[in-house]
Image (cartoon, rainbow, N blue to C red):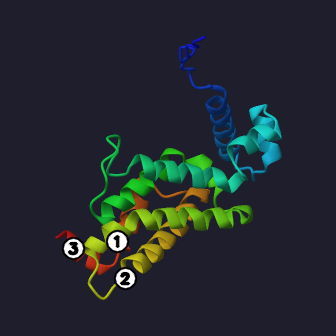
Amino acid sequence: MIYKAAPSSTRAPDPRPARTRAAILSAIERLGREGKELSVSQVVSEASLSRSSFYSQFTDIGNVAVQLFREFYEQSSPASELLEQPQTLAEATTTLLTEFNSKRYLYAAVLGSSAAVSAEWEVCEIIANAWTPIIAKQAPTHVSAEFAAVHLASGHLACIVTWLRSEKPASFEEIETQLHDMLPAWVEAATV
């Protein structure tokens, strides 16, 4: 007897994980607008989800920022048509600042607390890895691109988190100018 393979059925992706993730991000954004310190309990209560739903998406509160930044830089990679890859460190700074500003309350709530220190270092590493090729094109030969990327990413991140968490934050343009002005002189020389 010859058996025929059943026709392959392609199932649509399950929309529930995406809805769960969106509910978590929205809850964090709302709690962040209220200036509350975050806990998983607060987030799942605000999102009307179970703790297991949260942990199916994220390992902890800080992991929210890590995943968002990983996705942001993967989306803005040269292979992506969605975002143009920054060519200079000044452009990379503006791109970074724009991402933080687009989810201002979410990032302010997730980063900058003692619970998120390890997440901040992971975000810093993601930024530094994305910036290393840009810096390698601009840095003098005696400057290590990897070392400069970590230095600049950590400084920028610290300034941006302070800006996000400020009760009276400077405007986007003011913080952008400040960050650009703090770039090393060799960055300016490379872009002229």
Name the residue type under label 1: Asp
Above or below: residue 192 compared with residue 71: below
Label 1 – label 2 distance at C-alpha: 21 Å
Q: Give the x, y percent position of residue 58.
A: 69, 47
Picture quadrant of residue 29: top right
Name the residue beneath numbered marker 1.
181
- Res 146 label: none
- Res 190 label: 3
Question: Residue pushed farthest top?
Answer: 1
Name the residue beneath numbered marker 2.
144
Question: Residue pushed farthest left?
Answer: 192
- Element assignment for label 3: helix
Quarter of the N terminus within the rendering: top right
Name the residue type under label 2: Ser
- The residue under the point 82% across, 36% down is 50
In terms of depth relative to the viewer, which is nearer, 77 or 172? 77
Closer to the N terminus: mark 3 or mark 1? 1
Does 52 sit left or right of 152 as displayed? right
Label 3 – label 2 distance at C-alpha: 16 Å
Above or below: residue 19 compared with residue 136: above
Label 3 – label 1 distance at C-alpha: 14 Å
